[in-house]
Amino acid sequence: MSDKTEISAKQRGFQYQIWLMLLIVGGVILAGFIMVPKTEEQRQQMISMLGTTNIGELVKPTLDFSPVLSELEVTEKPKWKVVTVGGVGCDTVCEDMLVNSRQIHMLLGKSTGRVERVYLPNTATIDAEQIALLKMVHPFLTILPINADDFAQVVVGSSADWDMQDTRHFVVTPDQKSILYYTKEQDGDGLLDDLKHLLKYSPDR
């Protein structure tokens, strides 16, 4: 009789362990569904709350780049963008940063197709001959000449606001929101690592 009672107690204990494990697994899955951001805005709010491991500088508040990217070709699946802007014409620093962004784009491997490179030269400091030369050197770079004053209005009052005398990279989401920027002093590996991280945790729409 005592043997049967002991076996029954062990069985009940085993059942409790199974139910506890199921509850834990179910709770984790449910929490995952609840916490997954449904929009880019929600994702950015989560990043603000939990912090990030990004190497680039956060753009605060997130900026809408659609006014300066309005001439971009509309695609079925909007892409992430590395937007290069600033500098006086495309000087040596600008050229180095464009080459750097090209190498980073190639190093993304299978995710290369999810990212596009865009250069926004100032119409006042670059001419048609320079643009034609850049297109030859960078055949997969989209060049959209802009008025520097128009771009300055986009970044004014944000953490990314600067005099635009030097060149910067901006990481822009498929929704055309700028979230990170990089100066000429920052290592290109940081931009590559950040892009890989962002692409890994963002839906391929």
Image (cartoon, rainbow, N blue to C red):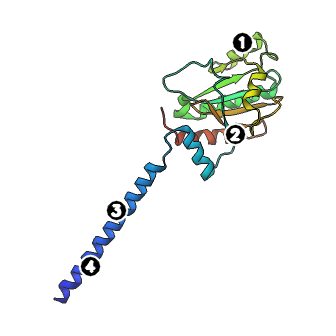
User: Dividing the picture into quarters, in which one does residue 19 lie?
Assistant: bottom left
**Tag 2–tag 3 contact (CB < 8 Å):** no
Residue at mark 4: 10
Q: From mark 1 to mark 3, how far is it between C-alphas?
A: 63 Å
Q: Residues within 10 Å of mark 4 (few under 14, many from 20)?
A: few
Residue at mark 2: 59
Q: Residues within 10 Å of mark 3 (few under 14, many from 20)?
A: few
User: Dividing the picture into quarters, in which one does residue 5 lie?
Assistant: bottom left
Q: Earlier in the sequence, mark 2 or mark 1?
A: 2
Q: Position of residue 93 (x, y in %)?
A: 80, 29
Q: Earlier in the sequence, mark 3 or mark 4?
A: 4
Label ID, residue 132: 1
Q: Secondary structure at mark 2?
A: strand
Label ID, residue 22: 3
Q: Amino acid at mark 2?
A: Val
Closest to the camera, between mark 4 and mark 1, is 4
